[in-house]
Amino acid sequence: MDLDEASHQSTIPSTRRVDNTKLVFYQISFRQLSLVTVLLPLVALVLCFITAYTFQQSEIHETHCKVYNVIPSISAITGISPERYLWRMSIALHLGPRFLISSVYYNYYASRVKLIVPASDQEWYTKLVKICYWVNITEISSLMGVTYISNRDNYPVHEKIFITFMISSLVYMLVSLIIYRRIHQPMTKRQEISYAIKKLLFITSIVCTAGLVIFFMKHRLFCHVLAFSWFALCEYIIASANMGYHVTVFLDFPNEVMAIAPKESSTGKED
């Protein structure tokens, strides 16, 4: 067995050349990275719900109204021990790739904006791309905030960060939809599917956000029975729609890879 065969059979990623000149030390499918990034909080949320609902019902159904409740909120199942440790670990692993994906979208949108015709529209959409990027950064940062500042630790701060997350999430969806439609004219079949999914999930988020606010007010002001359960149901749908929206990255970047390779100097040679 020669060295190349041994390296190929090894489970450890090996150094290889993508052409005659450039070395690649590590390479991962951007699609796979994106799917794993979204699956981390989804799997953690499901596990938190199952374990909390099975073993800690008295803790997760506790509200200031003391009324009958069936469905606990996300904050309730991720704010108690030991579920909060699982949730926080999953978000810690989730955040890094999310910031990376945000930057990838920014550069992708910015490159496509330069192709917009007429050219007079390019300046406006360049501004929209920047707004989209910073709103997405706000959304990701807010997710970090609501995760590590639970409603049990500091409810007023948790509530304000949660509102920031909701608003930034919806604004990001809307702005990215506007950009996506404009920079893909005409759309390929895959882009049409991605756009349709994004649009459906955005509408779902808007409708459920309205329900979220209504049922929260009913619970908070009037202590209606099951109002908090309806609030929690809307919250789960919104969370699922948010994850689904971000997982469409695998449709937008189906063949791209993320690679670690030596930096090239201005002369075209590796430093």
Image (cartoon, grey):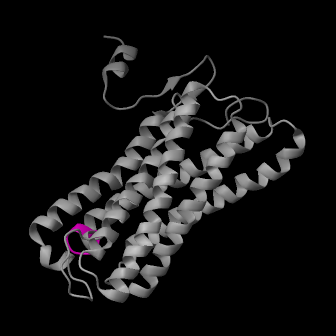
The location of residue 119, given as percent across then percent down, is: 88, 40
For this rendering, which residue is in front, 184 or 269? 184
Image quadrant for the N terminus?
Answer: top left
Residue 253 appears in the picture as rendered: no
Q: Quadrant of residue 50?
A: bottom left
Residue 266 forms part of the magenta stretch = no
- Which of 244 and 97 lies nearest the eye of the viewer? 244
Q: Quadrant of the C terminus?
A: top right
Q: Is residue 82 magenta?
A: yes
Residue in view at x 55 percent, y 35 percent? 252
In the rendering, at what x and y percent does residue 264 appear? 69, 35
| Residue 104 is at least partly visible in this image | yes
Tally of numbered discs: 0
Q: Which residues are magenta?
A: 78-84
Q: Is residue 10 left or right of residue 60?
A: right
Give the residue furthest to the left.
55
Q: Is 177 on the left or on the right of 142, as rendered?
A: right
Residue under the image location 42 percent in, 36 percent down: 32
Image spot of residue 43 (x, y percent)? 28, 52
Image point (44%, 74%), residue name: 213
Above or below — where is 36 with respect to 253? Answer: below
Q: In this rendering, would 195 be left or right of 67?
A: right
Quarter of the rendering containing residue 88 = bottom left
**Where 222 falls versus 209 (above or below)?**
below
